[in-house]
């Protein structure tokens, strides 16, 4: 497993994408800092930390979709997956290494965002309290869900563009439809999993979840159930598919 993870890490590190991603996160944080600092007085550290991390994490979700989609898609594009499948490692272990690396890469970027934003917040008035940090920390549930969904699509479809498109469409379309259903049929909206993936909503907008009679325990269970289902489907297809051109 260690050699598989090292191989995945090398393939990610040797591209320009990680540096572009870190640059985008830093730029967003700097923009928020500049905008808040341009007003009257010194901005609050808590407000800056909240706005800057939320903006950067939105792009983190996009980069997570792209990176995860390319993990299998680029293997097919450059015809390297066949060689990987002929290695001594089982298909289950190969798939698991890709999943673990996708999660690790996402978490490293997530920590980078928090550290940079917190560093800038130290120059502002006030302090970043646990009440501010908590919703940001639990919002990581969204990118984790996206990884499992994207990886499943990447095994189904050969094209990276199609995988990215399906993931983005499923995410945003379901969220929009679910948002409309909350006002009309909240009992139906409750079963749209995309409304539960970002657990920070229980801190940011608890009334939205109360309208569906949903609790954090239910959301965690429901999302975990989908994640397990996604992985089982992905593992079954990855184990049985020929990946022939």
Image (cartoon, helix red, strand yellow):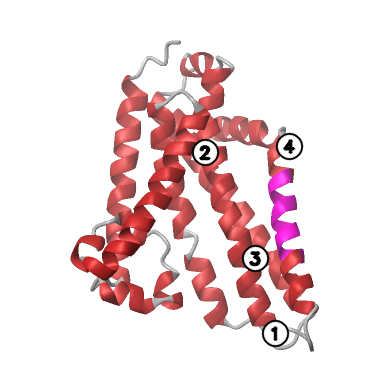
Q: Distance between the residues labelled 1 and 4?
A: 34 Å
Q: Mark 2 points at which residue?
A: 68
SS category of the residue bearing label 1: loop
SS category of the residue bearing label 3: helix
Find out whether residue 151 is within the magenta segment. no
Q: Which of the two labelled residues, at mark 2 and mark 4, occupies the earlier sequence position?
A: 4
Up the image or down, 194 lies above or below 15; here it is: below
Image quadrant in which you'd find residue 47: bottom right
Q: Name the residue under label 1.
A: 44
Q: Distance between the residues labelled 2 and 1?
A: 36 Å
Find out whether residue 25 is within the magenta segment. yes
**Label 4 Cα crowd, 10 Å radius (few <14 / some 14-19 / many 20+):** few
Residue range in magenta is: 20-30
Where does the image place residue 77, in percent across and percent down from the top left? Answer: 56, 19
Q: Residue 114 carries which label?
A: 3
Image quadrant in which you'd find residue 199: bottom left
Q: Select label 3 or label 1 by which is in front.
A: 1
Q: Residue at x 27, y 58 (%)?
A: 222
Q: How far apart are marks 3 and 4 (CA)?
A: 22 Å
Q: Mark 4 points at which residue?
A: 16
Q: Select label 3 or label 4 by which is in front.
A: 4
Q: How far apart are marks 2 and 4 (CA)?
A: 15 Å
- Report whether 165 appears left or right of 173: right
Q: Distance between the residues labelled 3 and 1?
A: 16 Å
């Amino acid at each position: 497993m260690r050699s598989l993870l090292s191989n995945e890490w090398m393939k990610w590190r040797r591209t320009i994408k990680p540096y572009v991603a870190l640059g985008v996160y830093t730029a967003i944080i700097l923009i928020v800092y500049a905008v808040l600092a341009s007003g009257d007085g010194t901005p609050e550290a808590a407000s800056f930390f909240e706005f800057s991390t939320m903006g950067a994490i939105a792009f983190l979700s996009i980069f997570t979709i792209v990176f995860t989609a390319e993990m299998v898609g680029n293997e097919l594009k450059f015809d390297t997956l066949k060689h990987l499948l002929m290695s001594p490692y089982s298909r289950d272990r190969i798939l698991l290494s890709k999943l673990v690396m996708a999660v690790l890469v996402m978490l490293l970027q997530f920590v980078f965002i928090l550290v940079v934003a917190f560093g800038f917040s130290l120059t502002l008035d006030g302090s970043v309290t646990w009440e501010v940090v908590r919703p940001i920390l639990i919002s990581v549930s969204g990118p984790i869900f996206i990884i499992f969904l994207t990886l499943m699509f990447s095994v189904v479809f050969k094209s990276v563009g199609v995988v990215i498109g399906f993931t983005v469409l499923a995410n945003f379309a379901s969220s929009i439809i679910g948002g409309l259903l909350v006002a009309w049929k909240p009992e139906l909206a409750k079963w749209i999993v995309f409304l539960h993936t970002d657990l920070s909503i229980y801190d940011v907008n608890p009334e939205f979840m109360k309208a569906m009679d949903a609790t954090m325990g239910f959301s965690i269970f429901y999302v975990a159930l989908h994640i397990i289902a996604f992985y089982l489907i992905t593992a079954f297809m990855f184990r049985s598919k020929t990946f022939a051109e």
